[in-house]
Image (cartoon, helix red, strand yellow):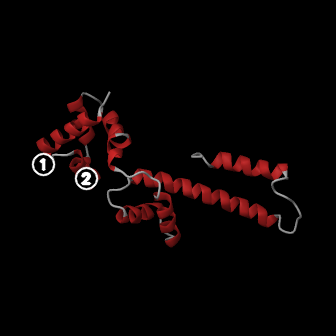
Amino acid sequence: SLEKDKLGQAIRKYLKKNLSLELNTDKEVFDHLEQMNKIEKRGIWQMIGEILNVDAETTKNFYHNTWCRQFYDKLGGCQKKLRQIMDLNPTASSSNIIDIFISQNVGTYSRRQISQIMYKIRQQQKNNNYEVKILEKLEGFSISINDCVILSDIFKTHNETNSIFE
């Protein structure tokens, strides 16, 4: 089982041996790794895993899912900021929106976190659009949606099948 302090030490050892970098804190290690591109990171988890006697996949997953989270802010205010960027850039790709968000909040959130939140926002928007389309088709009918079992079942089924995060 990996521990946070052991992973930080192993990464420092790797960086010192392979890149001649002397980094003192886990935050410095994290900042340096986040600035490395995919080519520079090639094979890094295999080598760090060997230091820890753990396989590359376990090392990589522990880094992304546990170790690096200590350096990110809680996601509380993130969703509102992300929605604003999405609204201001309606034709931008998901990747471009994430790039914009990350550049405005350097070192605060991971790309993976932002991607997951953006997916949730898009699913909510999709559900809202679906409900609006149904309501538009019913325009002119005198019906209470809350009292209509069929419509509430449709919305419930649609939301259950399309909202995996809720």
Q: Position of residue 67 (x, y in %)?
A: 32, 41
Q: In the rendered structure, are the residues bearing label 2 and label 1 in contact, judged by CB atoms less than 8 Å apart?
A: no
Please report the residue visible at 15 percent of the width from the left and 39 percent of the height from the top: 13
Residue ID for mark 1: 21
Q: Residues within 10 Å of mark 1 (few under 14, many from 20)?
A: some
Q: Tell which residue pokes out farthest to the right in this image.
A: 142
Q: Is residue 131 above or below residue 153?
A: below
Q: Position of residue 124 (x, y in %)?
A: 61, 56
SS for dot 2: helix
Please report the residue visible at 85 percent of the width from the left and 52 percent of the height from the top: 148
Please report the residue visible at 20 percent of the width from the left and 37 percent of the height from the top: 9
SS for dot 1: loop
Q: Is residue 147 left or right of residue 85?
A: right
Q: Is residue 55 above or below residue 141?
A: above
Q: Is residue 109 left or right of residue 12?
A: right
Q: Amino acid at mark 1?
A: Leu
Q: Which mark is residue 31?
A: 2
Please report the residue visible at 73 percent of the width from the left and 48 percent of the height from the top: 156
Q: Quadrant of residue 160?
A: top right
State which quarter of the image contains the N terminus: top left
Q: Position of residue 23 (x, y in %)?
A: 15, 47
Q: Is residue 145 above or below residue 48?
A: below
Q: Is residue 12 left or right of residue 156?
A: left
